[in-house]
Image: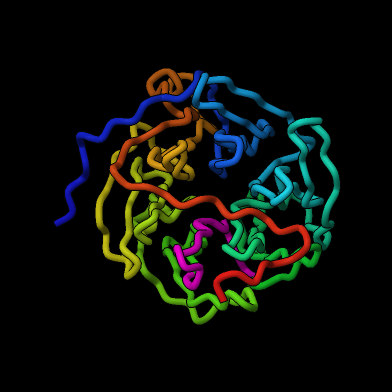
Amino acid sequence: MNTPLANVRPARVGTQRDILGESPLWDGRANCLWWVDIRQPAIRRLDPANGALQSWPMPALVGSIALTEDDRLLVALPQQIALFDPHTGRLEAFVEPPPMPPDHRFNDGRCDRQGRFWVGSMHNITRAPEGVLYCLEGTELRPVREGVCIPNSLAFSPDGRTMFFADSLRYELYAYDYDIARGAMGPERVIATTVPPGFPDGSTVDAEGFLWNAEFNAARLVRYAPDGRVDRIVPVPVPRPTCCAFGGPDLDVLYVTTASQNMTPEELEAQPLAGALLAYDVGVRGLPEPRFSISGPRNNNR
């Protein structure tokens, strides 16, 4: 029987309230945490050493971000994947995706350990199965999977040879053998199923190879063993956690983004942490975040 870790309590980080916080990433070079508010829309940066928070408005809904090898950010916007330089505030077009139908946008994105960026698109309003999962290698953006409702939970095992993914409205988490040389997904296997209305949102992998998933509408984080066994459950004080990432100089802080989207004033008053950035000590360390390779995938780990 799996017992929730009721004694694990989060700390609120900052006073900002995101509409739809997502895509947290720890930047080990700058010792800061990046994330996005998809609907603000904005990119945010936190310096935990002094609590300083910076925000940069984006011109359109920002689905996800990735670190790059040259210390910029890769930014998934509806009509382009761009490069953002936080030192200058400049946003530079990098890759133009195939024309998206009206009301479509990018959602979850993550780099594999060779520097490719995986990112999925979705219908922003209806969540119809019209989204596409893409892989960006250098400047080549190739479609890999179609018919996606809400792409989420993109993550990779420590050795890079297992890829995780979820189409949230199917209420399942998937794992795939991953060909690191070709950037190719193998056969799909279901490793976990959630109970509606809770569905798998964003994920991260810890140093022991376990998958941490933010379960949206279920007010919890779930740590899954590589075979899908539930290892532990961590309650979250808001109903809609969206994603998680390990950070801090020792990668021992689990940061969790949350949502306040579509909540009434009464609900917001009753749930003051909705939309907050939370920080947990779960006794586990994470892994350094991979960086996007602008020149193409690296050949390490072959």
The reply to whether the magenta stretch includes residue 41 is no
Specify start and end residues of the magenta stretch as a single range.
146-162
Tell me if residue 131 can be seen.
Answer: no
Residue name at image x 72 percent, y 52 percent: 104
From the top left corner, tell me how far across and down residue 302 is, in percent: 57, 77
- Is 234 left, or right, of 257 in this rendering? left
Residue in view at x 64 percent, y 47 percent: 64
Q: Residue at x 79, y 67 (%)?
A: 140
Is 160 part of what is drawn in magenta?
A: yes
Q: Is residue 158 above or below residue 92?
A: below
Residue 260: horizontal and vertical position, in percent? 51, 31
Structure colour scheme: rainbow
Q: Where is residue 128 in the image (x, y as percent from the top left)?
A: 62, 59
Q: In this view, does 54 lie to the left or right of 167?
A: right
Q: Nearer the viewer, residue 245 or 242?
A: 245
Residue 222 seen in this snapshot: yes
